[in-house]
Image: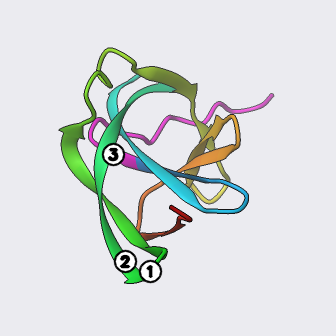
Amino acid sequence: MKTQKINPVQVGDIFAYSWGYEQTNVDFYQVVSTTAATCKLAAIAQERKHTTGMSGTCTPIKDKFLTGSLADVITKRVNVSSDGSCSMRMPLGLLVKYTKPEYFSTYY
């Protein structure tokens, strides 16, 4: 019998979603509610620091929800790994718990 892992995600946790092919885009989401197996997330703003002309690092701004994002809350199933880390599937990759500034690049 498979043991169900308990959802370790808490309201207020922040997740990063890095995606792109020719450039690296980063979106941040903040957990607004949880259940035993899922999370509801809303998009939040970010601060960018350019280290070169077209790239740098970005960090989330907690509680600064993007306009309309609370109306556009997404629900995702939480995947808990054997090491206790968690992630959630997105169309082009995974949402992973934010731990450090994320790299971004842009061509415009």
Mark whose residue sits in front, 1 or 2: 1
Element type at marker 1? loop
Residue sitting at 27 percent across and 41 percent down? Answer: 12
Element type at marker 2? strand
Label disc, if present, on residue 99 of the rendered structure: none
Quick check: marks 1 and 2 in contact, CB under 8 Å? yes
- Any part of residue 69 in sight: yes
Q: Nearer the viewer, residue 48 or 74?
A: 48
Task: Tell me the distance, in whole angstroms, between the alpha carbons under discs 2 and 3.
Answer: 25 Å
Magenta stretch: includes residue 4: yes
Label disc, if present, on residue 50 of the rendered structure: 2
Mark earlier in primary sequence (1, 3): 3
Task: Tell me the distance, in whole angstroms, between the alpha carbons under discs 1 and 2.
Answer: 7 Å
Q: Write down the region rendered in magenta.
A: 1-14
Looking at the image, residue 78 lies above or below residue 73 = below
Q: Amino acid at mark 1?
A: Gly
Magenta stretch: includes residue 13: yes
Mark earlier in primary sequence (2, 3): 3
Residue sitting at 59 percent across and 46 percent down? Answer: 87
Element type at marker 3? loop
Q: Name the residue beneath numbered marker 1.
A: 53
Q: In terms of image quadrants, where is residue 34?
A: top left
Mark whose residue sits in front, 1 or 3: 1
The percent position of residue 8, horizontal first and vertical second, equals: 45, 42
Mark whose residue sits in front, 2 or 3: 2
Q: Name the residue beneath numbered marker 3.
A: 13
Left or right of residue 97, residue 58 in this image = left
Number of residues whose C-alpha sits closer than 10 Å to that of mark 2, classed few (under 14), some (14–19) or many (20 or more): few
The percent position of residue 4, horizontal first and vertical second, equals: 64, 30
Q: In terms of image quadrants, where is residue 92?
A: top right
